[in-house]
Amino acid sequence: MKPKNTKDRRNSFLKFLLLFLLTTGTIITAIFFNFKVPAKENALLKEQSKMVKKEMDFQSKFSKEMFEVKSLFDSLEVAGSNRTFNNSLISSKLVDMQKSIPTKDSTFRYDMYTRIVDLQVELQNTKKNLHELRDAEEKIKEYKELLDKCLDEYKDLQRHNALLNSRSN
C-alpha cells in the first residue's frame, strides 16, 4: 500500500531539508565570522600599534635632536665661542635630522618634520646675519668716534687757520 500524499510528503521533506541547510549554513557562517574577523582585526590593530610606537619613538628622537640643536644655537651667543665650528655642528645636525625623517610616513607628518628642519636652517641663517650686523654695528660706532675726532681736529685746524689769517693781515 502506497500512501496517497507521497508527493506532498516529498515536497514538505525537501522544503524542510532546504530550510534546515539554509539555517545551518547561516549559523556556521556566523560562527566562522565570529572567530575569524576578530583574529584579523586583532592582527590589524597590532600592526597599527607597532606603527604608532615607531612614530612615537621617532618623535622622541627627533625632539631630542631639536633640543640639541637649540643648545648649539644658544652656544652661538656665548662670548668667545668658536662660531664657525658651532655653525658647522648645527649644519651637520640639521642634515642628520633631515635624513632621519621617514619617507614612508604620511605626507602631513613628513611635511611637518621637513618644515621644522627648514625653520631651523632659516634660524641659523638669521643668527649668522644678526652676528654680522652686530659686527657692523661695532664698526659703525668706531667710525662715528673717528668721524667725531676728525671733525674736532677739523674745527681746531679751522680755528688755527683763522688765527693765522687774522695775524697775517
Image: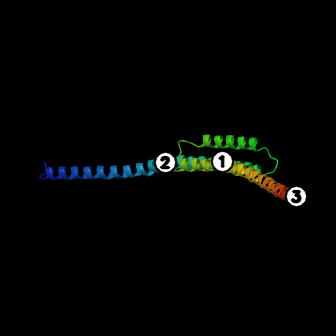
What SS does tag 1 mark? helix
Residue that mark 1 sits on: 125
Q: Earlier in the sequence, mark 1 or mark 3?
A: 1
At 63% from the left and 49% from the top, the residue drawn is 122
What SS does tag 3 mark? helix
Residue 167's disc is 3
Q: Earlier in the sequence, mark 1 or mark 2?
A: 2
Residue 75's disc is none
The alpha-carbon separation of the residues under discs 2 and 3 comes to: 115 Å
Residues at circles 1 and 3 in contact by the CB criterion of under 8 Å: no
In the rendered image, is residue 12 in sight?
yes
Label 1, residues with CA under 10 Å away: few <14, some 14-19, many ≥20: few
What SS does tag 2 mark? helix
Residue 39's disc is 2
Label 3, residues with CA under 10 Å away: few <14, some 14-19, many ≥20: few
At 79% from the left and 56% from the top, the residue drawn is 151
> What is the three-letter code of the residue carrying label 2?
Ala
Label 2, residues with CA under 10 Å away: few <14, some 14-19, many ≥20: few
Left or right: where does residue 19 sit relative to residue 163? left
Residue depth check, mark 2 versus mark 3: number of the one nearer the observer: 3
> What is the three-letter code of the residue carrying label 1?
Asn
List x then y, in percent, for residue 66.
Answer: 67, 49
The alpha-carbon separation of the residues under discs 1 and 2 comes to: 54 Å
Of 12 and 143, the residue lying toward us: 143
Left or right: where does residue 58 sit relative to residue 106? right
> What is the three-letter code of the residue carrying label 3?
Arg
